[in-house]
């Protein structure tokens, strides 16, 4: 009987990509992916530590896996990713039946470690060095970027892919665990990235999303050649068959004009930038160690809109950070009101042990205040999202069709509700046949809500490279869709 692997993924796009790659590697070892934990021989939990809630979610999942392990002691349970790197001992203490703890820098070892558990029945631990455990080079070497050959059947859609261009982070925002869970910032050589993009396009991929914690800090130096993100994008732009290039997540201080210029000039680059500001109050930004002021951010935003007309910008916010008063929160509200983001992701501050903020500042904003501020900020953002989406009504937009919408998935007729994204990352739903999935079509926008545009396909004319009909999406093994932006 074929061996089966089950995986649960929490967190950012980096984790979604890591899960895709780990599953691809296990498939090459003869495993099939199952979405039923009770059927699995190997259960993997790819984890996130950015907020406490994400960690608790993993501990609940591990709790649910326990009876399965109890009934079938040969089952292998593995915890991967950020929690594995950060909390090796705590995991073994809270869930002693876990067989494998594998950090973000050791994912290549997963197939071998599974075999080792099976052969020895001994728990296996593979994690990188802590940031203060050794010199920079040694720590860097212990975080290995995991970029094996891609398996197109492992993605939610074969025509879209994440491509890692950088691992780690050196910004050390005081609230954030990422510099320790993902290690020092390291940019992959451009040739490796370009060749991965060519391989993906040969497999039918039309849209690549370049990912990094601070993707616009990408810099690769070899001899006297320096490759910035703008050069990297320019170097892949003319790949025949590639239609769209996105990149996330941007760090505000590194939004340089060369980057704005490639976004404006190169037609395949999506006119959408996710640039988290986190707070509109200078004192809070200082305690967060974001290295900019609110007015620096707003000037950057103005420059961005001037140099890239029509660009859509989104942001992240943390409310209730240590010492955030009503007055400082009001500054954030005003910044959101003025900034006209297409969308914002708003999070309640979650103290993370081991971070500078946890050491230095008391988590002094009560939970109910955090909740209220979250709702209040969301209400202001929703007004802007509504206005932003309303402005699109009457336009004709190019949509890369991603698949049936949630509503369309339940319909059996040949014409169903489909969903896709525009070149400014707006979500559009419209009626069409599944033949359009994976194609780029023109859609006339007829109506809007704060988060969605509603439109009609202008004939079933397809833009760009003509693709073959694609297999029904439901027949493909699905890795979980991501729901959160990358940290930055
Ligand atoms: N608490 C709450 N939100 C956080 N983020 C990062 N660390 C924390 C934390 N400790 C948010 C930031 C980041 C997003 C992905 O998660 O807004 O941009
Ligand atoms: Fe790095 Fe982003 Fe975390 Fe700051 S919030 S430390 S930039 S990953």
Image: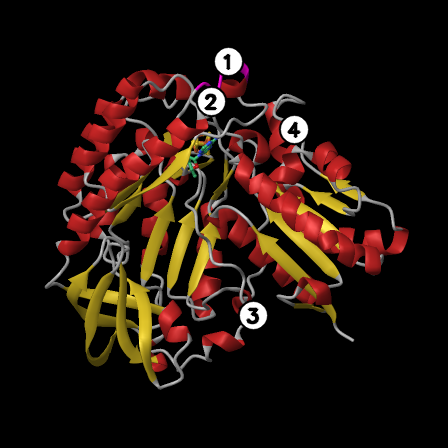
Circle 1 sits on which residue?
Answer: 360
Query: What is the secondary structure assignment of the residue under circle 1?
Result: helix
**Mark 1 residue's CB less than 8 Å from ligand 1:** no
Alpha carbons under labels 2 and 4: distance apart: 24 Å
- Between 425 and 336, the one lying in front of the other is 336
Circle 3 sits on which residue?
Answer: 477
Residue 142 appears in the rendering: no
| First to last magenta residue range | 359-364
Task: In the rendered view, tell whether residue 28 sits above or below residue 325.
Answer: below
Q: Position of residue 70 (x, y in %)?
A: 82, 55
Circle 4 sits on which residue?
Answer: 138
**Mark 3 residue's CB less than 8 Å from ligand 1:** no
Residue 333 is left or right of residue 67, and the answer is left
Q: Residue furthest bottom?
A: 414
- Between 179 and 327, the one lying in front of the other is 327
Alpha carbons under labels 1 and 2: distance apart: 9 Å
Alpha carbons under labels 3 and 2: distance apart: 39 Å
Alpha carbons under labels 3 and 1: distance apart: 46 Å
> Label 2: how many residues lie within 10 Å, few (<14), some (14-19) or many (20+)?
many
Query: What is the secondary structure assignment of the residue under circle 3?
Result: loop
């Amino acid at each position: 009987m074929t061996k089966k692997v089950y995986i649960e993924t929490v967190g950012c796009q980096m984790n979604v990509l890591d899960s895709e790659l780990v599953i691809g590697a296990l498939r090459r070892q003869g495993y099939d992916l199952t979405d039923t934990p009770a059927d699995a021989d190997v259960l993997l939990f790819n984890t996130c530590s950015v907020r406490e809630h994400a960690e608790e979610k993993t501990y609940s999942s591990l709790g649910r896996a326990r009876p399965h392990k109890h009934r079938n002691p040969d089952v292998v349970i593995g915890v991967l990713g950020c929690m594995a790197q950060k909390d090796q001992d705590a995991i073994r203490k809270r869930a002693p039946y876990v067989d494998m703890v594998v950090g973000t820098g050791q994912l290549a070892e997963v197939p071998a470690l599974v075999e080792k558990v099976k052969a020895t029945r001994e728990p296996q631990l593979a994690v990188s060095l802590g940031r203060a455990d050794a010199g920079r080079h040694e720590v860097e070497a212990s975080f290995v970027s995991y970029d094996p050959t891609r398996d197109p059947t492992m993605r939610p859609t074969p025509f879209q892919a994440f491509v890692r261009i950088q691992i780690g982070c050196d910004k050390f925002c005081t609230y954030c665990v990422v510099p320790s869970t993902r290690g020092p910032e390291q940019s992959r050589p451009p040739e490796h990235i370009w060749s991965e993009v060519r391989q993906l396009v040969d497999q039918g991929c039309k849209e690549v999303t370049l990912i990094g914690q601070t993707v616009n800090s990408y810099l690769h130096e070899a001899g006297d050649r320096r490759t910035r993100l703008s050069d990297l994008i320019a170097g892949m732009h003319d790949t025949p068959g590639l239609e769209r290039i996105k990149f996330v997540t941007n760090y505000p201080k590194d939004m340089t004009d060369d980057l704005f210029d490639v976004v404006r000039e190169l037609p395949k680059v999506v006119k959408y930038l996710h640039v988290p500001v986190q707070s509109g109050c200078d004192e809070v930004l200082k305690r967060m160690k974001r290295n900019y002021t609110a007015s620096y951010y707003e000037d950057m935003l103005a420059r961005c809109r001037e140099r890239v007309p029509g660009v859509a910008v989104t942001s992240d916010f943390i409310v209730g950070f240590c010492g955030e008063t009503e007055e400082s929160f009001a500054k954030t509200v005003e910044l959101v009101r003025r900034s006209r983001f297409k969308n914002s992701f708003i999070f309640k501050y979650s103290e993370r042990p081991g971070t500078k903020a946890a050491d230095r500042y008391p988590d002094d904003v009560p939970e109910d205040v955090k909740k209220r501020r979250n709702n209040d900020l969301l209400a202001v953002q929703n007004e802007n999202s509504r206005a932003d989406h309303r402005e699109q009504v009457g336009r004709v937009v190019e949509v890369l069709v991603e698949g049936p919408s949630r509503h369309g998935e339940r319909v059996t007729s040949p014409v169903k509700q489909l969903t896709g994204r525009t070149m400014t990352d707006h979500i559009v739903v419209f009626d069409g046949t599944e033949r359009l999935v994976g194609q780029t079509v023109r859609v006339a926008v007829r109506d809007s809500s704060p988060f969605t545009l509603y439109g009609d396909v202008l004939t079933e004319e397809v833009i760009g490279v003509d693709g073959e009909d694609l297999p029904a999406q439901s027949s493909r093994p699905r890795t979980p869709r991501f729901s959160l932006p990358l940290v930055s």
